[in-house]
Amino acid sequence: MKRRIQAFTLVELMVVLAVLVVLAGGAGVALQRSDHAIALQAGQTLLARSLASARVHATLTGRNASVAVPLDPAEPNRSLRAVGVAVRDQAGVGWIPAGGWLTFPPGVALVPPSAAGNTNEPAAEWADLRSSGLKEPLAVVGGVTALLLEFTPRGTVVGGGGDLVLAPCRKLPAGGEYPFVFQDPDAVRGLTVSAYGVTEWIHERAGF
């Protein structure tokens, strides 16, 4: 008895290839989302360490200390993309950097407390997402204009604390009004800081 040899037809091969393409595309999207999640988590850790450092500096020096986030048109690659610590000078007027600026992972930036200085996609979905913990007006830290979250030597927060919202962002071509655009508001993470300086990690939009 002859054994029948089974083989794929051209149509079956095309179906298999189509399925593989779809699976590869899905894997790429999943990998991209995973990369965003890892970058946002690293940004959270950087923010948390900066908050702890600022609080310690305030306690040790007996002067107010701040977490500083650049918001400066002259610093497009650093604006909302870096964080530092600063301490009040002896006169209590200016700010002295306590170390250099630390940059968030690629593709991550800090949402400002108001719409000024950034752009969102789509804009309507970002209305409730603001870094309310960063207080205005702007200050100058080491020659860089920055937003501040300020601690007293007792560990309390000037202005009552608030949220620090990290979001995925997409870089825009050089020469435009903004260096990047925020996207995917449902993927945000960050921290919230109480008036007493207690920090809570937020892992989803509903937490803000």
Image (tube, rainbow, N blue to C red):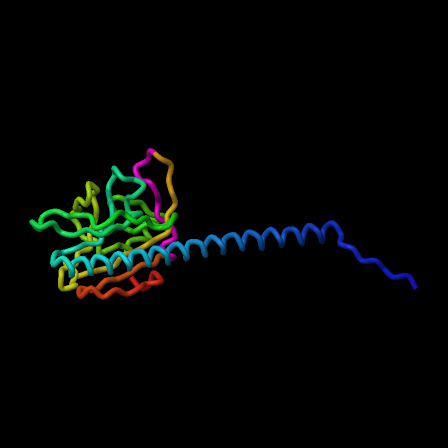
Q: Nearer the viewer, residue 196 or 184?
A: 196
Quarter of the image with the N terminus in it? bottom right
Please state if 56 lies on the left or on the right of 170 as rendered.
left
Magenta region: 175-187
Q: Give residue 179's quadrant in the image.
A: top left
Residue 71 vertical position relative to residue 58 in the rendered view, above or below? above
Q: Nearer the viewer, residue 39 or 189?
A: 39
Near-viewer residue (183 or 142): 142
Q: Tell me if I can see residue 159 in this picture.
A: no
Left or right of 187? Residue 137 is left
- Residue 111 image point, x, y percent: 29, 51
In the rendered image, residue 178 lying in the magenta stretch gets the answer: yes
Residue 186 lies, in percent from the top left, at: 37, 57
Quarter of the view holding residue 198: bottom left
Q: In the rendering, at what x and y percent does residue 106 appear? A: 38, 48
Residue 163 seen by the camera: yes
